[in-house]
């Protein structure tokens, strides 16, 4: 049986970020990932269908992990403005309103993952285990034992579940979760537009769901996230390119001129899920293993990275103080730190989704007037921008996510 002080199950972006933050801890680390990611050597010709809108807090973390320069060399797009509208209501946010060069960055998930995997390889402190299909979790007084479908065993002092929405760690540890399906799918594609995107994130709310067009490095390419009822999404996925673009154009409008090409498409189910516990003895969940939110504002990865940074901080603090980092008291501190903020974000995204999908005439009128009023209230807009950039946490932000220099905050 191989023994480690810390095992991470799941080698996605959040799991890799946590591993990179812990790489110099002095602990013996291993990561279980049956489908290891092959880092990009150069940006692929076609854009990744999955992208993330990274906040400044996430950027700070990736800079501190020495990943940001590689991400920038691969491919990213700063977005300097955001336009949100429906029918007769609209609001426009601009980074200049808070004296910032941008609101955040749109980054392909493949670029983020590549930089993190390469960072772990350079550090050389985390063993990658790829041929281990976790099926059993057993607790012992001083450790947790993991077994795979061939009976092989690993043992660790501390287990981290970073294995996504259908977390095997959460299920094997009998950690209950609650939530619901939205009965919607997000259709994603890369759209070529006649007019340049102007480094602006565009989002139109329709009665059936929001349509987001996120700017990519090419000024005439955007990443589409189109939320639709499941049956309609299935139909849209089967359309040839011309009728697909025609239907999208009708729903999105002409803010970016004619929609000229779409290429490959994919879709994924939209859901809300939250684990009632983030921690047990010698065990913690981070990222989608702990919570899944609606992608309305693109915050899923950002709050997952905050989880990773917060958990790393409480463990590293114990190590600095000469304490055992697997103490339940330590893990509970992480849960108290992150759970409330995550629930607030989940509630806000779920509330916005329900608000903008309500077609009652009175609700529609109030919603449109609310957008118009907010657009004219400069102090409120400024606070909304600061919140969206991930700069509102102050001392509550994990140290790895705080501004690198005192002048970084607006």
Image: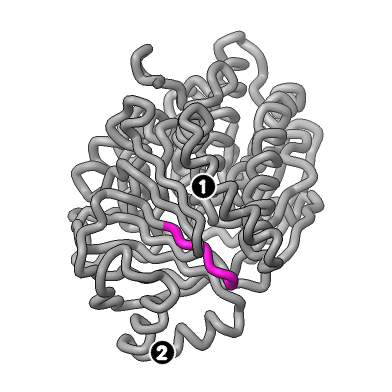
Residue 7 circle label: none
Image position, residue 363 (x, y; %): 69, 59
Rate crowding at label 2 as few (under 14), some (14 to 19) or many (20 or more) other CA atoms within 10 Å.
few
Residue shown at 76% from the left, 22% from the top: 329
Q: Is residue 220 above or below residue 409?
A: below
Render colour scheme? one colour
Which region of the structure is painted magenta? 203-208
Residue 280: image location, x then y, percent: 77, 37
User: Any mark on residue 372, and which?
Assistant: 1
Residue at 75 percent of width and 58 percent of height: 179
Residue at the far top in the pictured view: 321
Which residue is the site of mark 2? 239
Q: Residue at x 43, y 61 (%)?
A: 212
Q: Are marks 1 and 2 in contact (CB under 8 Å)?
A: no
Indicate yes or no whether the magenta region holds residue 350: no
Which mark's residue is nearer the viewer, 1 or 2?
1
Q: Does residue 378 lie above or below 394 as drawn?
A: below
Residue nearest the observer in this picture, 153 or 144: 144
Does dot 1 land on a helix, a strand or a loop? helix
Residue 390 visible, this orientation: no
Q: Is residue 323 visible?
A: yes
Report which quarter residue 17 is drawn in. Answer: top left
Residue at left offset 66%, top offset 49%: 291
């Amino acid at each position: 049986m191989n023994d480690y002080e810390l095992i991470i199950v799941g080698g996605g972006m959040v799991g890799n970020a946590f591993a990179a933050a812990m790489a110099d801890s002095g602990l013996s680390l291993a990561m279980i990932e049956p489908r290891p990611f092959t880092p990009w050597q150069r940006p692929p010709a076609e854009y990744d269908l999955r992208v993330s809108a990274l906040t400044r807090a996430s950027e700070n973390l990736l800079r501190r992990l020495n990943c940001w320069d590689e991400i920038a060399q691969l491919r990213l797009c700063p977005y300097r403005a955001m336009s949100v509208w429906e029918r007769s209501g609209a609001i426009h946010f601009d980074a200049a309103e808070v004296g910032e060069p941008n609101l955040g960055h749109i980054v392909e998930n493949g670029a983020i993952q590549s930089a993190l995997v390469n960072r772990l390889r350079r550090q050389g402190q985390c063993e990658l285990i790829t041929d281990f299909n976790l099926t059993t979790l057993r607790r012992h007084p001083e450790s947790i034992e993991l077994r795979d479908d061939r009976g092989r065993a690993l043992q660790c002092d501390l287990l981290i579940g970073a294995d996504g929405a259908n977390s095997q760690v959460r299920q094997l540890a009998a950690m209950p979760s609650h939530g619901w399906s939205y009965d919607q799918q997000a259709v994603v594609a890369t759209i070529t537009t006649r007019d340049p995107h102007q480094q602006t994130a565009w989002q139109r709310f329709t009665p059936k769901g929001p349509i987001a067009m996120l700017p990519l490095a090419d000024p005439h390419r955007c990443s589409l996230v189109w939320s639709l009822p499941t049956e309609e999404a299935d139909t849209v996925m089967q359309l040839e390119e011309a009728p697909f673009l025609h239907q999208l154009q009708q729903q999105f409008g002409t803010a970016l001129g004619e929609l000229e090409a779409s290429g490959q498409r994919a879709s994924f189910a939209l859901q809300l899920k939250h684990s009632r516990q983030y921690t047990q003895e010698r065990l913690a969940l981070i990222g989608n293993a702990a919570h899944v939110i609606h992608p309305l504002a693109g915050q899923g990865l950002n709050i997952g990275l905050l989880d990773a940074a917060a958990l790393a901080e409480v463990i590293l603090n114990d190590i600095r103080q000469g304490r055992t980092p697997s103490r339940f008291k330590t893990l509970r501190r992480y849960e108290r730190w992150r759970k409330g903020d995550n629930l607030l974000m989940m509630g806000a995204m779920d509330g916005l989704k329900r608000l903008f999908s309500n077609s009652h005439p009175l609700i529609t009128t109030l919603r449109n007037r609310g957008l118009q009023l907010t657009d004219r209230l400069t102090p409120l807009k400024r606070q909304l921008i600061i919140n969206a950039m991930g700069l509102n946490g102050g001392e509550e932000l994990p140290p790895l996510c705080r501004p690198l220099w005192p002048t970084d905050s607006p």
